[in-house]
């Protein structure tokens, strides 16, 4: 802020440059002020015929301290802002019981520090502080053209609505402040679409002047005693309402209602409403809200509906000498009170960057504006989205639905405005310059001169090595810590897995497609069949001939991923001990024990990737109370090697009983058990037998149980009773079978903390039934790499936030679906089903459909970015 204030007082001697601002709302007028202060000449184009003295659709807004300080620099009489607003020192969230018409407090913040204003009042204050001749009222933007050399000029065409003439204006810079439906943004991003929130809002302002002692106002102040100093949020079932007082005896209210997306008419997100619609709203209000609030709505003249939209964060904010500000740059839902505040801050920072760099370095000024604003506004838009979905009882975060009647105190705190990213920073000590934001060193636009950021990956399994590949591709220096002394040439516990098409495509970025095909076999068929344990007969339950997975042995896949990495990045024989994030959150220090020398080593990086499996120590550091969930069953596993045994009785029997082996993923379903088997490359058959058993007592950091000869013999006997003779014989001839205890966990609330992020089974322990563990790990790595490449080290928090936003919904749904599939196939109780699944009677389309992989959420196309 000090940099801005000093700059505003500095004398300018250079020739003024002209900036054309499209849009005369608060964002555009704020830019005009900032441009004048920076020594530029603004011309504002606005389609409204005259300044709005009062707006039929404009309503209340809240101004944060930072925005108010900026406004005070532009307004001739700073006291005018204070006298035109009312304090909002309290942020109060309450739950309303619609039947009893009572309310109770959920969360209260008595240090909120905002002020309430009416849109028309604020617009008038900003407008009247500008020179009178810089705004072209009644001019509708038509088009623009940037000069061929990208630096000399931009020509804007506009139509004078009164005369019908077309005018051309030439400037050095075009600022698009033309709102959430920006036509200028559409010029550069023609496929970019707004996202309907799932709800719209009735809005209104009740004018109480002359009614201060009326029954309606007396009752309202009794029910809302802190009105005039408080921002009220009333939450009911799948809806919420906002209420606060404005200057000059006015009450502003907003009622959000879930509904299908209305059809927009014209270039506005405001709907025309009929008398019938208003009357229906009044009736509904009396059912939902306390009588005092319903009465305010009924007494309000000319209420209207806003359709609530936002958008995913834009990839950039400027092109050549055209820059976006305000809602054109970041359409947002209203729940974080950010739209007006972000617009004012956009203007202030743009002006600061233009003044700092001068007109001769316009590209550098716009680059810095984007570097400062894009991370902030992106996080704030996404947080406002989540807050709105939470308050409306829609799915948010880790696929929860917030119920205000049953919410815990911790959940209620999430409702508060101060959880907005950059809430404290933006409101007190914002870093205006890129040098300050990114640690004191001036950031250079030449990427080659930057220090390569370093990541420490804990875990050298497939998840960790995939992360290493993805981060190397994104320009990071990678160090992997793995406790195994050497790369696994063969693994006694590693067994078969299957790769979906998307995971294989990602792997092909790091490994040749030929190598992938050479070590895998195609699984084009998925076949589910019921086994009668007495007669040993089989009946097909479900069949998918378009499965298109490829199967591999875990060791083979690990080997080719490992060998494609630089040889010196993995510290074999190093066991993770602890982590420490620096106070300024800029680095993380990892301590590890070198197992061969017993020495302790410390490694400092910019990012820590936890790929340390389902029993993750790093996850436990942040979520000490998080527990794995035992599934209710374990699994015998084995790989039968039939090299030089192709003509053995076991193989002849298997190929006769399972004629599509080598191209098919078989599922045999018995009573309260099921078996999976498929062929692997190099003459191996992989099999897994799931059996219901109480939770075993695990020893050490592994979910694999040691088995005795007696346990193996017992398994052989049971197999002869349950499975076909061919499968039982295969199991009996398999060397060194082992048991995996089957665990998963409920979806995590988040995937990162500061500069520590979870991937693979550390992020989403899952049961194996949907073939997701390895595939999810590879997709985690790819998305993380793409986010880090997009945002860079300087915007690490934004990169991790986007990674979490992309992956958390997908992995959460897939883990829960896999859990459902496992319990179904094991004949265990499934929530919502009255009876247990019986494969002998499961011949309805519904039952059969649930068994197949293709019904997994996101089966065909897992998103790799927010725009997917």
Image (cartoon, rainbow, N blue to C red):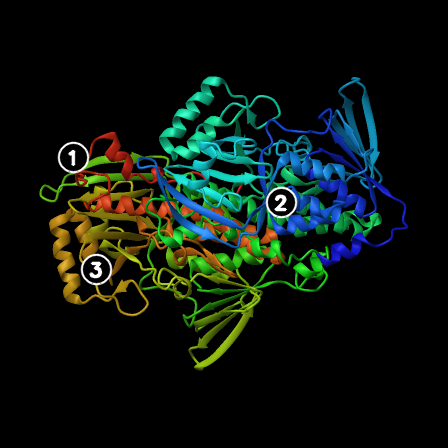
Q: In this orientation, which residue lies closer to the viewer: 463 or 212? A: 212
Cβ atoms under marks 3 and 2 closer than 8 Å: no
Q: In which quarter of the image is residue 584?
A: bottom right
Which of the two discs, 3 and 2, labels the residue nearer the N terminus?
2
Instruction: Say whether residue 790 is left or right of residue 749.
Output: right
Q: Which of marks 3 and 1 is in front?
A: 3
Looking at this view, name the residue that lies furthest to the front.
213
User: Is 105 on the left or on the right of 382, as rendered?
Assistant: left
Name above or below for residue 645 compared with residue 128. Answer: below
Which image quadrant is residue 620 in?
Answer: bottom left
Residue at image mark 1 = 841
- Whether 56 is drawn above or below 82: the answer is above
Which comes sooner in the sequence, label 1 or label 2?
2
Tell me, yes or no, whether the two marked residues, 1 and 2, touch with CB atoms within 8 Å: no
Label 3 – label 1 distance at C-alpha: 29 Å
Where does the image place residue 235, in percent across and percent down from the top left? Answer: 41, 40
Which residue is identified by label 3? 695
């Amino acid at each position: 802020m000090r940099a801005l204030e000093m700059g505003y007082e500095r004398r300018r001697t250079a020739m003024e440059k002209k900036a054309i601002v499209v849009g005369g709302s608060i964002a555009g007028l704020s830019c005009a002020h900032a441009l004048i202060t920076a020594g530029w000449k603004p011309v504002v184009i606005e389609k409204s015929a005259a300044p709005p003295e009062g707006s039929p659709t404009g309503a209340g807004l809240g101004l944060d301290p930072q925005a108010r300080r900026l406004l005070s620099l532009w307004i001739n009489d700073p006291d005018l802002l204070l006298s035109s607003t009312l304090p909002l020192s309290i942020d109060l969230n309450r739950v309303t019981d619609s039947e009893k018409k009572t309310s109770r407090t959920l969360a209260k913040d008595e240090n909120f520090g905002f002020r309430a204003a009416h849109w028309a009042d604020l617009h008038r204050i900003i407008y009247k502080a500008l020179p009178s001749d810089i705004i072209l009222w009644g001019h509708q933007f038509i088009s623009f053209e940037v000069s061929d050399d990208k630096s000399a000029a931009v020509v804007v065409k506009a139509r004078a609505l009164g005369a019908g003439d077309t005018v051309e204006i030439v400037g050095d810079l075009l600022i698009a402040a033309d709102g959430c439906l920006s036509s200028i943004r559409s010029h550069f991003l023609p496929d970019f679409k707004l996202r309907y929130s799932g709800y719209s809002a009735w809005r209104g302002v009740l004018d109480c002047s002359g009614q201060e002692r009326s029954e309606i106002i007396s009752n309202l102040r009794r029910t809302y005693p802190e009105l005039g100093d408080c921002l009220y949020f009333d939450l009911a079932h799948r809806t919420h309402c906002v209420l606060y007082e404005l200057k000059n005896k006015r009450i502003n209210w907003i009622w959000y209602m879930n509904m299908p997306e209305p059809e927009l008419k014209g270039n506005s997100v405001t709907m025309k409403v009929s008398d019938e619609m208003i009357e229906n709203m009044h009736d509904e209000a009396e059912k939902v809200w306390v009588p005092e609030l319903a009465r305010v709505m009924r007494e309000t003249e000319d209420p209207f509906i806003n359709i609530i939209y936002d958008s995913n964060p834009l990839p950039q904010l400027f092109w050549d000498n055209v820059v976006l500000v305000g809602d054109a740059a970041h359409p947002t839902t209203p729940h974080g009170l950010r739209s007006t505040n972000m617009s004012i801050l956009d203007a202030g920072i743009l002006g600061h960057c233009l003044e700092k760099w001068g007109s001769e370095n316009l590209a550098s000024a716009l680059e810095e504006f984007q570097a400062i604003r894009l991370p902030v506004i992106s996080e704030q838009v996404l947080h406002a989205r989540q807050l709105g979905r939470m308050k409306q009882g829609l799915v948010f975060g880790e696929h929860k639905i917030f119920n205000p009647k049953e919410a815990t105190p911790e959940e209620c705190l999430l409702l508060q405005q101060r959880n907005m990213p950059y809430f404290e920073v933006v409101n007190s000590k914002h870093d205006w310059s890129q040098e300050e934001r990114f640690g004191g060193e001036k950031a250079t636009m030449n990427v080659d001169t930057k220090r390569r950021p370093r990541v420490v990956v804990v875990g050298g399994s497939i998840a960790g090595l995939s992360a290493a590949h993805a981060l190397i591709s994104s320009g990071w220096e990678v160090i992997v810590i793995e406790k195994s002394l050497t790369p696994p040439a063969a693994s006694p516990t590693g067994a078969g897995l299957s790769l979906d098409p998307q995971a294989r495509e990602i792997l092909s970025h790091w490994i040749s497609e030929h190598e992938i095909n050479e070590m895998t076999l195609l699984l084009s068929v998925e076949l589910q069949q019921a086994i009668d344990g007495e007669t040993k007969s089989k009946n097909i339950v479900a069949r998918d001939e378009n499965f298109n997975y490829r199967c591999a042995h875990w060791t083979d896949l690990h080997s080719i991923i490992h060998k494609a990495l630089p040889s010196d990045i993995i510290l074999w024989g190093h066991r993770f001990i602890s982590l420490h994030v620096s106070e300024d959150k800029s680095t993380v220090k990892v301590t590890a024990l070198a197992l061969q020398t017993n020495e302790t080593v410390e490694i400092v990086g910019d990012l820590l990737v936890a790929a340390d499996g389902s029993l993750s120590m790093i996850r436990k550091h942040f979520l000490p109370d998080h527990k794995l969930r035992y599934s209710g069953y374990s699994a015998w596993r084995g790989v039968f090697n039939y090299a030089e045994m192709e003509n053995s009785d076991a193989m002849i029997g298997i190929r006769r009983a399972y004629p599509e082996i080598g191209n098919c993923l078989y599922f045999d379903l018995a009573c309260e058990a099921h078996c999976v088997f498929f062929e692997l490359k190099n003459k191996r058959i992989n099999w897994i037998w799931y059996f219901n058993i109480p939770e075993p007592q695990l020893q050490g950091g592994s979910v694999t149980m040691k088995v005795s000869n007696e346990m193996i013999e017992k398994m052989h006997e049971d197999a002869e009773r349950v499975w076909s003779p061919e499968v039982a014989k295969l199991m009996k001839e398999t060397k060194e079978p082992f048991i995996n205890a089957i665990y998963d966990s409920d979806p995590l609330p988040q995937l990162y903390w500061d500069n520590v992020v979870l991937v693979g089974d550390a992020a989403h322990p899952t049961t194996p039934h949907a073939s997701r563990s390895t595939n999810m790990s590879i997709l985690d790595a790819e998305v993380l790499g793409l986010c880090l490449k997009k945002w860079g080290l300087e915007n690490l928090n934004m990169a991790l936030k986007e990674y979490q936003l992309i992956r958390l919904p997908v992995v959460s749904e897939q883990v829960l679906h896999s859990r459902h599939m496992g319990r179904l196939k094991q004949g265990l109780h499934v929530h919502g089903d009255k009876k247990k699944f019986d494969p002998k009677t499961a011949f309805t389309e519904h039952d059969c459909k649930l068994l197949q992989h293709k019904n997994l959420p996101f089966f065909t196309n897992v998103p790799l970015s927010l725009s997917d």
